[in-house]
Image: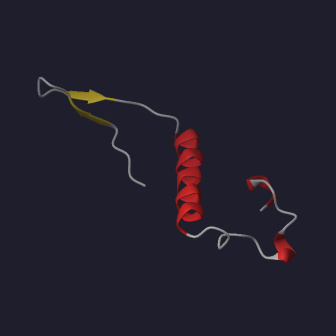
Amino acid sequence: MFVTCGGIDELGEWKKISFRKDVMRTRGMWNIRQLLLSRWPGAVALPPSLAHITTESQW
């Protein structure tokens, strides 16, 4: 995912924006997960040997 650090406003002037990288990363991963689940229901699952992993920090 690429995110710009700003954009051009209606007057043609550059406006800097800021964002929280960790929040965008988490949301981006969630969106990709949801897309995969909607396209292939039941196909995106951990194998039984990894079923104990329920949070990102457990990886």
Q: Residue at x 15, y 25 (%)?
A: 10
Picture layout, residue 54 above or below residue 24: below
Q: Residue at x 79, y 76 (%)?
A: 47
Could you say where residue 15 lies in the image, as x and y percent from the top left?
26, 27
Residue sitting nearer the eye, 30 or 5: 30
Picture layout, residue 34 above or below residue 40: above
Residue sitting nearer the eye, 35 or 50: 35
Picture layout, residue 53 above or below residue 28: below
Could you say where residue 34 lies in the image, as x and y percent from the top left?
57, 56
Could you say where residue 8 lies in the image, as x and y percent from the top left?
19, 32
Picture layout, residue 21 above or below residue 33: above
Query: Is 3 positioned to the left or the right of 55 in the image?
Result: left
Query: Is 4 positioned to the left or the right of 30 in the image?
Result: left
Which coloring applies here? secondary structure
Query: Is 41 positioned to the left or the right of 24 in the image?
Result: right
Q: Residue at x 83, y 71 (%)?
A: 50
